[in-house]
Image (tube, rainbow, N blue to C red):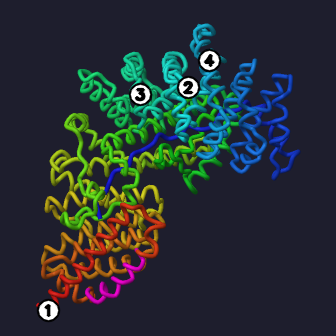
Amino acid sequence: MGKSKTTKFKRPQFNAVGLPVNAVKELDAEEEEHGDDSCPAAELLEKLQSPSADVREFACASISRVVQQSQTIPGFLQRDAVRRLGPMLLDSSLAVRETAAGALRNLSACGGQEVCEDMVKHDVMTPLTALLRESCAGFERDAVPMKDQKNAVEDVANEAVNLLWNLCECSSQSLSVFNKSGLLDMVVQCLERHAHNMELAISAAHCLHTVTEDNPELLCSINTAVLGVVENVLLTSQPGMTHTLLRTLAAGTLWNMKGSLPVARQAQTLNAVVATLSQCLDLDTGTLIPELRQAEEGRHRHTPAAADIEDQAAGEPAVAEMDEEEEEAPPQRKRNGKAATIDNDFSDLLPRDKEELREATALLTAQQTSLEIIVNMCCSDDPSDDEWEEESSSDESDMGPDGLCDGVSNLMSPLCLSAEVHGALINHSIPEKVLKKTEFPRKEAMDVCHQNSSWRGLIKKIQRVQSRALTCLHSILSTMDAESLGGPAALQGAAQHLSTLVFGAAEIPKDEEFLEAVISAMRSLLQMIASKNISQCMTPQQLMSLSEAATRCDVVSVRVNAVAILGITGSTLAKEKGTAETLQMIGNALLQVATRDADLVVNGEALDALFDVFADGDEAETAAKNIQLLPALKALQPVFKAKIRKEGKGKYSPQQLCVLDNIKVNLRRFIGYLEKVVKN
């Protein structure tokens, strides 16, 4: 049905704001008065009109906290919260500006795409742009000589940049305003503050990384000054995980801006970008996270009173709540029509003095981002990349040009890297480093996180790095040749490693994000191995186990890739002697999926795999007779045709329907082929 595609990653969102401890306590008391089920939206919005700056600040901080519970958001929107909070961005009090920006930031982060678009319709970009312009103008005027001293103007700018980032992530209209309003220069100014305000610089770097992706209008206006600032950040050498994250985001931004780079500097910049990603992946989270936790404990032993206050202020309930929600269903956003899974990262709810935990979070975010950038490097510019998992099918399909529909032949073409990107990735040993990151997290790091409630939120982030590494491996396998990856021995070693990830435990892991990533990587690897006639490493029992686990999975792409793996392995076994019994098992499993799966794309993938497994050879012929393949396909044919006719147009894309129609034609031809075999 087509070449399995890599999927581009959008930037993970950096959500929420830290509230003063006293504001949280006061709000909790107020919520008790109102009762658990009521939303104090009307009263809080009314307080925005108070002549007292303290009251206005309290109201904004309270709204910021309340809207973290997404069920309260409609109550605020119905009361015109965006229009009433917007003017607060230009309040005479800097504290009110900061908390108002924080409230709008949380509203955008917790409300998702619809709320962001609604905010832009209510013209939030106008006061936000004015606020950023004023803040940037005040940087030098209000600069403070002490490196660690709090700067109110920069705190306001930090909240504003995060709000801007959320809006541009979700709304094409806000991105258009960004392009036309000179906001790029303001965000770059915020990035330049990295020497003495890393929090602001990292927020700006996240925002730049987002707005420069797939935004040709903005990229046309990139000048040498902007490129110079980002390159200077990339070439910094300060130690620490937050600096690693900053350099990683700069690397991603420069990759997005590659078309704006002077030709003479492109190769040098690309090498610096890949070197930065390589250095980030070199860091061993299994060692560093226990070390950071140990450093935190040592600091607490010297300041026990401060540790008690810190634990009370950590905002752990909010972090835990969001982690639970994230595991249930990662929210989906769309920008420029492309779907993106967004990470609910509430790490900046942590007080500033949770420095070790912030460092650990920055490390994991940097590694996840590095892997996502490498995935994007391996992607073609095909607009259908984001839908690879829905449109893909068995790579081993060998249909001729007469079997293709117009507009779908691009799905059959292998992806390829430019020589420069390929060379840079190989020179910096990126494939080996990515493979290393696919290993299960070290027990020591996981234990540290399990044992401390404020570190528990890192567990999901550690697991996500592994899943991103597997997706990255899939991308690399889809775009590089076997020799570049170390030849047959290296491929067999990688296959053995992936098999251990899936089959090493008593049962196949159930985490859908992990399962989706590992099975797509396994599919790409097994296809490469098959194309080189290297012996496969999966036993029949493992194949059946994988098939059964995938059948129970709700994610369509997992079922698609599992079926493809059966097809790849079966077509290889069909060339060997004494494999008829295993081919029967594979054939029965594929027939069951083709007949019973609720999704037409999965049905089609199973049929495609059957064509490959039973296309030729004595073993395949024997197995086909034993499982009564011909009568089974004859019975299935009218059902499959009717299902396409009945469900197709409303449920599947034109490309998917075109591929399914092609399979329908091939099914008729394959039945004809089996009939000839029976006669002979």
Q: Which residues are magenta?
A: 630-644
Mark 3 is surrounded, within 10 Å at the Cα level, by few (under 14), some (14 to 19) or many (20 or more) other residues, namely many
Three-letter code for the amino acid on which mark 3 is drawn = Ala
In this picture, residue 359 sits left or right of residue 516: right
Q: CA distance from mark 2 to mark 1?
A: 75 Å
Residue 236 visible from this viewpoint? no
Q: Name the front one of labels 3 and 2.
A: 3
Q: Residue at the spot x=53%, y=47% of the render?
A: 333
Residue 556 in the image: state x and y as whole percent.
43, 64
Sequence-earlier tag: 3 or 2:
2
Residue 588 in the image: state x and y as whole percent.
32, 81
**Residue beneath label 4, please?**
135
Mark 1 is surrounded, within 10 Å at the Cα level, by few (under 14), some (14 to 19) or many (20 or more) other residues, namely few
Sequence-earlier tag: 1 or 4:
4
Looking at this view, is 98 or 164 the one in front? 164
Q: CA distance from mark 3 to mark 1?
A: 66 Å
Q: Main secondary structure of the magenta part?
A: helix
Q: What kind of element bears circle 2?
A: helix
Verify CB contact (< 8 Å) between mark 1 and mark 4.
no
In this picture, residue 143 sits left or right of residue 77: left
Q: Which mark is residue 199?
A: 2
Three-letter code for the amino acid on which mark 4 is drawn = Ser
Three-letter code for the amino acid on which mark 1 is drawn = Lys
**Residue beneath label 3, please?**
250
Verify CB contact (< 8 Å) between mark 3 and mark 1.
no
Q: Quadrant of residue 229?
A: top left
Q: CA distance from mark 3 to mark 2?
A: 15 Å
